[in-house]
Image: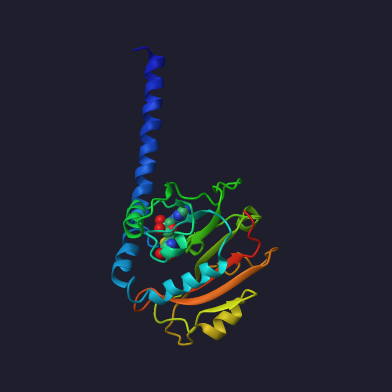
Amino acid sequence: MSPALCRNTTIRLESFLKHYQNKAMGFFRSLISTSGGIVYHARALFFERTLWRSHQQSVKTFLNAWNPPTVSLVLVGPSAGYSLPLDFLKRFNNITAIEPDPMARLLFEMRTGLRPHWIKDPFDFESKELQFPQGAILFCNLLGQIESTGNLEQKLKGRPWASYHDAYSTSNGHFEIAFKSASAQITDAELKTAYVPSSSQHIINDHNTLRLFSKSETPLSFYYWNWQLTPRRSHMIEGVYSASAQE
Ligand SMILES: C[S@@+](CC[C@H](N)C(=O)[O-])C[C@H]1O[C@@H](n2cnc3c(N)ncnc32)[C@H](O)[C@@H]1O
């Protein structure tokens, strides 16, 4: 083999190995992630039919209020669909789902009987161009786990979209909030004083999601509810959707 051919073959082999190494790392990362992956599926196994019922009902009411006028739906981070009502999903002729966790994809199909078109790479929030397929877009409790969402609202302009996401979490108790809708976003201060348990034992994590849509140019509808994730851990969920629902 000539030296040039040998060098080319080595370079090709290296990039081939690197590609599959990155894929394998992504695969394992998605399995052990704390916001998805095995820990999340184990929690679902224990609590989906008990503690999570009230949250599932709240998601259902929220999605029925959104009711986008499209035949296609794009789910971003649906996991196995634990929070998503089947009758809502069945309204759409086709569903595309962006979900990097292979176990979530398998469980989604087993639980719902639906076969979405899967996009297995994580959605790149930093990309300049919007890479969503056609349809209404639903962010499924993902935005509170993403460090930077780029200029998301700008990218979603003119598309029907909705998101439910963690606003706050506590590792010891629950948020004293019944399901409620609001025409304006509740402020940080209002949430903290009105709904967060006052005991100093409660450790509250702020997911920084209340800033995401605070300067919106389009009218938005807001919903708030408590999700008792485990007997000790709770999320305060914010649901938000764009009122301009043209595809
Ligand atoms: C907190 S879990 C979602 C829970 C689920 N939607 C529910 O409500 O039961 C976050 C999900 O987002 C997925 N995920 C993480 N980063 C993502 C990305 N950049 N694009 C799409 N999905 C992502 C994870 O694999 C995980 O299944």
Is 40 left or right of 147, judged from the image as shown? left
Is 59 left or right of 47, judged from the image as shown? right
Residue 136, given in percent of the width and then of the height, sits at 56, 56
* Quadrant in the picture for residue 79: bottom left
Instruction: From the viewer's side, name the closer residue of 198 and 119.
Output: 119
Residue 156, given in percent of the width and then of the height, sits at 62, 55
Tell me the quadrant of ligand 1. Answer: bottom left
Looking at this view, name the residue that lies furthest to the right. 217
Counting the numbered discs, the total is 0
Q: Is residue 231 above or below residue 76?
A: below
Is 138 left or right of 114, judged from the image as shown? right
Image quarter hosting the N terminus: top left
Instruction: From the viewer's side, name the closer residue of 78 and 229.
Output: 78
Name the residue: 47% across, 74% down.
58
Is 46 left or right of 78, judged from the image as shown? left
Residue 102, given in percent of the width and then of the height, sits at 34, 51
